Image (cartoon, coloured by chain):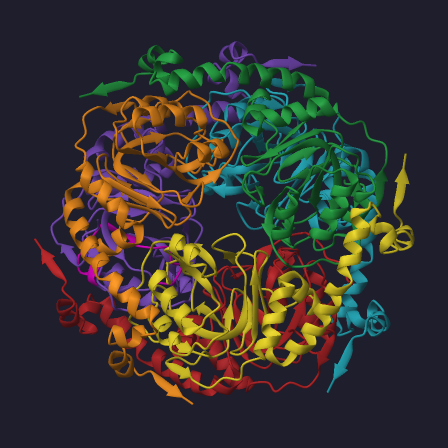
Chain colours: A red, B cyan, C purple, D green, E orange, F yellow
């Protein structure tokens, strides 16, 4: 049962430097480093190509068609945070526009991840304030019902705990629990490290079949070549 | 019951200047000024980022997979119109391409809103002819069955009467009844007028909580802060 | 019943020159020239605006969440091929990223058409390696189960036989059977030939109603004009 | 622009006998008799197999997640009405359950058509109170925002004016404007009249090809038989 | 490229006895016996619970919103056939109702599989004429454009060749190529044969972990139990 | 980050009597008693009308197309449990059929909630083993990859912790945290208690407007009646 009407002011954020470095590695690499877990549903899309953000999660639970708590969450943002907004039922309304983006940016937010809709996307794009959302819609919202700030929320199918690391780019959004952020960074960095040489070999025409020694397992699995 | 096989040649268009000025205010502001009504479903998306149009509605009712009436509607377009196309059943075929766009543009159309598919989107983008649609598809259509021109239609969930004002941009499409266009413009302009100062304050770090005097109603509603 | 665990090395490819020329005509024209058949479902979208590819199909049948066979297919690619990937059940995982794209490109592939997800879309865009897919997702895959290479597959609702011509652009993806590629090219080129003069007339304000002699058939069908 | 906060108490209802007789003909026949118009989107499904209702429309416009106006509409129901509920944005919440059904039934309602969700479907089924909805969901609603009663609404893609005839069964929901109810009944009854003899012939093995004299038009259209 | 306007009168049907026996084994068992291939997309649902059919495929290719060819296919039905209907683009119209069902049944059809909509479902249910479809809709169709009969079609993502075996039940629809029908029957029957004893053991509380000897491979894969 | 390859054998289950009594109150009442939280997405539907289950959650995390862990979870079931199965990515395969149902039932399971597909639904219905799922599909699965048992999972958008109470019926599925099960039961029972008298009044024609004293707040909110 979600706690309603509560704002947790003190959360333990993951290390900001670790969050920033996870961001440079990108969602695909980070998600692989976590054993292929932690990804939000692929319907979450950036509002412009090339959007990128990473930071520590400040969470907000909203009600359908009601964006009141986005004003409450603004006060809890610290430099380097990414706001993660969940809704208690499916809704595509445009909860967030250029005024809130101006406020969030002034407070130090790196971006917004919202399992609902946003609007003013042209201005948000010009501001380079990145948002990942389920929909784009001019549809407005009311300010009537209390939700909560900095409780654990389920956003687009993933559990996000306040302080977790959020990495988001063109490929989607991944959440890294604060407790495993450093370990994930190490694994992701190791993964990334040997990609350069692989890329060179593949560009030179070497086949993955040979580079990854796949021919034998494929044969064992029964693959047959027919001329 | 939709009237079929009829072309209404004389429609009463909303004031073109009002339509143009509503366009500069954008869909989100106009939709708010109308008490949050008038928006088409958010699946209606522009074919390119930054698309913008506003004008008076010329309507066309089409049948699934049949674009015959788009040729009929071309003759009814006047400078400043936006064509609004509804279909009697769900269909994603590409009803509209670069030849029709050339014709519509020559007749003075500001854009097309179609609850179906379009094609030739690269050329349409180069021509800067804005289209809002449900789908993009190379799938062609036949020219067999009569629909109607300038009757009231339901397009993407909204009732559009010929002569209404259509405002469309990255955030979606909104329809403003001709009779309330001026009133809506006034309300929207008033709304817009005080956004500039709000934006400045928010950019300076002032919180919406304070600017909108939300702290008291939030407390009354029972919001609790926990350290 | 799909044959599983088989790689056909020798396929009869359509003429590469015909494939290239079909590409310049675009999907809408080619699909019309085929009697409005051959189009993949419109949920197949390019990962960047302006993507274009044409070539001969090399096919691969994959299992959900398993991209092993993409490494096997790389070896079968020849200059001018487009890889067409089908999956035995719905899946949005990101099967394909920048390393595989580097390999495919080095082998001469013109692009990829995949009825599933892709990732690393920013890098693919920078590489200008065009992909048409059902989804974009950072979600990775395993390498466990055998599929097949160069068997007939159903991809996004269309039957693709190895060696067929694939034409893909912003409007979607169309498959042209190798046996009818030349005939389709002739029909498509003829269609294209008289579009130029049509475009000029329409731009000058001539109506399609007159240019296509539609007034009489519309009247016969019962269309009524009301002033 | 939808009028908000208004209850029209006096509406002109279509003839109740005509409404009842349209109900016996069923949605498919009635929709054909209207020139294949008037049908709500096919996502509207009855909550139990065999549900049937026909009557005069009493309309209600709701907001997402807010069922307050369903209590207001109850007072406006007269014997023989079908309540038609539209929502200003997509929502699947369960707006309606057994208590409201008890009330609606007591007031004489024949059923409910709602472009949103319902709940308590087991009890509604036991009560034999038919509902056509977009979803079934236990998700509750609030009672905060005013909508309107007996204004024209767009419900599941169709325009419904208060007093129109609603016919609903397993095949969907169709709206017949009050002004054309009698004409539609005549056309539908005529259509139905000669179905009996057709059914007998077809049951005896006569082909539609012969019964409808289709062989010649098919041949003219170019149909070829190949042995 | 689909051949349009052609009726193939002579097709080679799979053995009718084999088709009937595959039907008794059910879709899940048959699909497993085929190496988990051959299944149509799961959006294909029976119009009533408990629907079951098996037989040899007679195919028909339809255009969106046009059911003309369903009358043509009726003549090609032989006792024991299942009609498989594909459409050249997505469409949910009700192509098929009680009159066509009466005709199909009189001709000996076992059922219909259609990648579109049907109507008159109450009557079809009473007639016990089973249909698997994508939608239920009262929406009617025209009779204008030629399709084809007994060509290979892609229906709900699966390739169906005339004469193939179709097995359909509550779990979906599977297509078995005529050439491998006997082999599939043997494999499916073998699979079924030892299910009885398994069911008894499981009912007695024996775990699949033990019955299938899974404990060792699970341990090898690294599964850890924590108390 | 989900823990993979782990089976927690000892979980703290909510009180079984409380779970049973919550079941008699139904999902709508329980969900309201929780402040309208705890509901799984409404795409989760029972495989037969009238399905009902309540019990304590035993959880399993599965991979797409892989049901190996369902055999592992069977051993952890105790009388009164409901199995809750989540999948790491969207998948509609039929993970669960009559053999597993036989085993689960023998172990004492009250039902299954699975964010994926099931099969053998006719037999499951005959067995009266209730399942709530996202899809029905004959599509089989492999047994290759480890998931986990009795970890916290996100199922259909809701967080489920092992031992929580699951209540499921025709209206959907709700999860009640073990720690608040008693409190929720008290609130739900209180809610239910006064529904009987309300129902009687409504059945007698009393309006909710009067029974709930809504007339004054509606008037204050500005509702206008027009004759």
Q: Is residue A166 left or right of residue C35?
A: right
Q: Indicate whether D217 appears above or below E86.
A: above
Question: Based on the displayed image, in which of its 4 quarters is residue F61 positioned?
Answer: bottom left
Q: Position of residue A170 (x, y in %)?
A: 47, 64
Q: Residue furthest left?
A: A227
Q: Is residue F200 left or right of residue F115?
A: right
Q: Nearer the viewer, residue E216 or C202?
A: E216
Q: Position of residue C117 (x, y in %)?
A: 39, 59
Q: Nearer the viewer, residue B111 or D15?
A: D15
Q: Position of residue C205 (x, y in %)?
A: 55, 23
Q: Residue furthest bottom?
A: E227
Q: Nearer the viewer, residue D208 or B212?
A: D208
Res E159 visible: yes
Please state, as top left, top right, bottom left or bottom right, where the C terminus of chain B lies in the image. Answer: bottom right
Q: Position of residue C97 (x, y in %)?
A: 35, 64
**Residue C84 highlighted magenta (yes or no):** yes
Task: Please tell me how many numbered marks the rendered image carries.
Answer: 0
Please state, as top left, top right, bottom left or bottom right, where the N terminus of chain B lies in the image. Answer: top right
**Residue stretch in magenta:** C72-95
Question: Based on the displayed image, in which of its 4 quarters is residue D169 positioned?
Answer: top right
Question: Based on the displayed image, in which of its 4 quarters is residue C119 positioned?
Answer: bottom left
**Residue B110 highlighted magenta (yes or no):** no
Q: Is residue C44 left or right of residue D154?
A: left
Name which residue lies at 24% across and 68% down.
A202
Res A88 visible: no
């Amino acid at each position: 049962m979600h706690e309603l009407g509560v704002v947790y002011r003190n959360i333990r954020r993951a290390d900001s430097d670790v969050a920033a470095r996870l961001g440079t590695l990108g969602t695909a690499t980070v998600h692989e480093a976590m054993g292929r877990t932690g990804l939000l549903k692929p319907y979450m899309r950036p509002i412009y190509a090339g959007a990128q953000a990473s930071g520590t999660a400040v969470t907000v639970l909203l009600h359908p068609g009601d964006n009141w708590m986005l004003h409450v969450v603004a006060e809890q943002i610290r430099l380097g945070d990414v706001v993660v907004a969940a809704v208690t039922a499916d809704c595509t309304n445009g909860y967030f526009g250029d005024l809130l983006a101006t406020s969030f940016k002034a407070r130090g937010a790196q971006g917004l991840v919202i399992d609902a809709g946003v609007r003013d996307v042209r201005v948000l794009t010009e501001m380079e304030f990145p948002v990942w959302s389920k929909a784009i819609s001019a549809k407005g919202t009311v300010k009537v019902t209390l939700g909560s700030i900095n409780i654990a929320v389920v956003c687009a199918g993933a559990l996000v705990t306040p302080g977790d690391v959020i990495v988001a780019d063109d490929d989607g959004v991944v959440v890294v629990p604060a407790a495993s952020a450093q370990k994930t960074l190490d694994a992701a960095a190791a993964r990334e490290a040997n990609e350069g040489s692989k890329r060179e070999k593949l560009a030179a025409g070497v086949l993955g079949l040979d580079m990854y020694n796949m021919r034998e397992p494929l044969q064992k699995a029964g693959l047959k070549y027919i001329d």
